[in-house]
Image (cartoon, grey):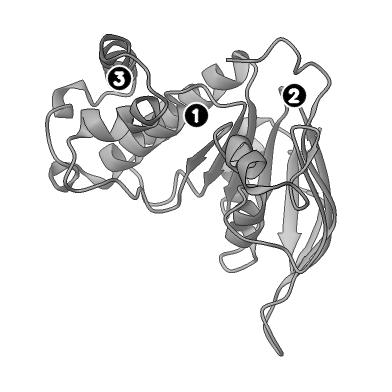
Amino acid sequence: MLRGDAAGMTVVGLDNIGKSHGAGADGLHDISLTLETGDFCFITGARGAGKTTLLNIIALADKPSSGTLILFDTDALEADRATRSALRRRIGIVFQEPRLLDHLSVADNIGLPLRIAGTPEMEIRQHVGELADWLGIAHRIDSGPQALSIGERKRAAAARAIVSRPDLLIADEPMDGVDDETVPMLMRAFEQLHNLGTTVLVATHDLAFARHSGRPSLHLDRGALAIADDGAAG
């Protein structure tokens, strides 16, 4: 849920971020981007353009070769380990691959962030049940991830990312390979979370999908980021 002191906060601030992958390899060059509380933005780009690398840097899963990264008004690259851990806990991530834990049920996968945070079991069951029902996977709640379709796995992974109502949601190609039923469900979930005050950043190679969303869009090409010229920018 949106924190009372978050109004006007720089949730993500990238200043001249670069990432080198070695001689001859593509990387990121002088990426600058600012997202404030409640923004909803798409990053488009072809497969291999560097979208995942950029999201990993924002999520503190990778370090840039140069530049400055601000998260929630905090210099994340200069922060100590405890502060970085605290920043990560404010971020929900929908990975390109669902990354569900095979030894846990769908319910336990979705509820994992809450359980790690020490949320009471009754409250976990309530939140998990509501999200599973809302995303059309209530009938799969006791199943293992192996029994789910790719669309159902993506929905379960999205539910896990948003169950704790993060201040920042990062989604990497969330619609990739899913069925027509799953796409509007995921977008509805992202929009609802955004309505609660979460800043949302979605990466996709699907320019038409980003354009149709009506949300501001930036385009990543050859390691550089620019306002998209596809009509999605606002």
**Disc marking residue 128:** 3
Give the labeled residue for mark 2.
Answer: 37
Q: Nearer the viewer, residue 172 or 187?
A: 172
Q: Earlier in the sequence, mark 3 or mark 1?
A: 3
- The Cα atoms of the two marked residues, 1 and 2, are separated by 19 Å
Q: Count neighbours of disc 3 (C-alpha within 10 A) and say few if under 14, some if 14 to 19, many if 20 or more.
A: many
Q: Secondary structure at mark 2?
A: loop
Tell me the quarter of the image containing the C terminus.
top right
For discs 3 and 1, the disc positioned in front in the rendered view: 3
Secondary structure of the residue carrying tag 3 is: helix
Q: Is residue 12 left or right of residue 207?
A: right
Residue type, numbered disc 2: Thr
| Disc 3 from disc 1: Cα separation | 18 Å
- Residue 51, given in percent of the width and then of the height, sits at 63, 58
Proximity of marks 3 and 2: CB atoms separated by less than 8 Å: no
Element assignment for label 1:
helix
As shown in the figure, which amino acid type bears the numbered disc 1?
Met
Q: Earlier in the sequence, mark 1 or mark 2?
A: 2
Q: Is residue 111 visible?
A: yes
Single out the residue that lies furthest toward the bottom: 23
User: In the rendered structure, which disc, 3 or 2, sits on the residue that comes first in sequence?
Assistant: 2
Task: For the N terminus, give its image quadrant.
Answer: top right
Can you see residue 180? no
List x then y, in percent, for residue 202: 60, 41
Label 1 neighbourhood size at 10 Å, few (<14), some (14-19), many (20+)?
some
Q: Residue 187, which numbered label? A: 1
Q: Marks 3 and 2, how far apart in space?
A: 25 Å
User: Looking at the picture, which amino acid does disc 3 mark?
Assistant: Val
